[in-house]
Amino acid sequence: MWVLYGVAAVALLGFLWLGRAVATGQTTPFDTAVRETVHAWGSVWLTRLMVGITQFGTPRFLIIVTIVVGWRLSRIGRWRAAALLALSTIGMTALSESLKVIYHRPRPSAFFGYTEPMSYSYPSGHADTSICFYGMLVFIVSGHIKSDRRRLAVWVETAILILLIGCSRVYLGVHYPTDVIGGYCLGLAWLIGIASRFVHYYR
């Protein structure tokens, strides 16, 4: 657990450092270079794929799924797991939206005619909320997977989905790359903090 706490601390410091760099404009060359490179890869089929993938990280969608999954968990007596999933997802959404207002970073111009969100840009709500929802969900169910190989496969598949969601936001142009990286850092720190309570209850 101390190793995980160390990872959470590093992730949180990374988020704060990146936020300061964003506020002072130090990340502009990096963000611009990545956006131009990604935009050059654009194609019709890839845009359709990314539009579909990005829906799996929409905070509103994840909150609805959290409520449904939480209800199912409570039905089988796993009240604490349901509560921790809700705290991980809904709590992260609320924190992310609050931090967007604090950092007040304007959105970049969207690519490929995608509708630009009305909220601020840093951190990416898709990135931080998806890592908290999918990460906590897999953390809850992986304890019931007996096969180590299958458990590893589930974790890897989940990590790939989370990374694709973040990439979709950059590809569609609605976030700077540093928004997504910052979101991952924030979400990882929050997830570890909440997941440690799950270990406390079920050890």
Image (cartoon, rainbow, N blue to C red):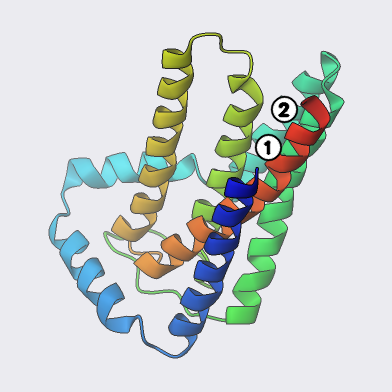
Kind of residue indicated by mark 1:
Ile
> For the point 65% across and 33% down, which residue is it?
65
- Mark 2 lies on residue: 68
In this orientation, which residue lies closer to the viewer: 113 or 176? 176
In this orientation, which residue lies closer to the viewer: 41 or 30? 30
Q: In which quadrant of the rendered image does the N terminus lie? A: top right
Horizontal side of residue 62 vs 31, given as left or right: right
Kind of residue indicated by mark 2:
Val
> For the point 33% across and 64% down, which residue is it?
173
Q: Residue furthest top?
A: 146
Residue 41 pos. (x, y %): 14, 55
Q: From mark 1 to mark 2, how far is it between C-alphas? A: 6 Å
- Mark 1 lies on residue: 64
Q: In which quadrant of the rendered image does the C terminus lie? A: top right
80 to 55, vertically: above or below: above
Do the residues under discs 1 and 2 have CB atoms within 8 angstroms?
A: yes
| Mark identifier at residue 147 | none
Horizontal side of residue 161 vs 77, given as left or right: left
Can the viewer see residue 128 in this picture? yes
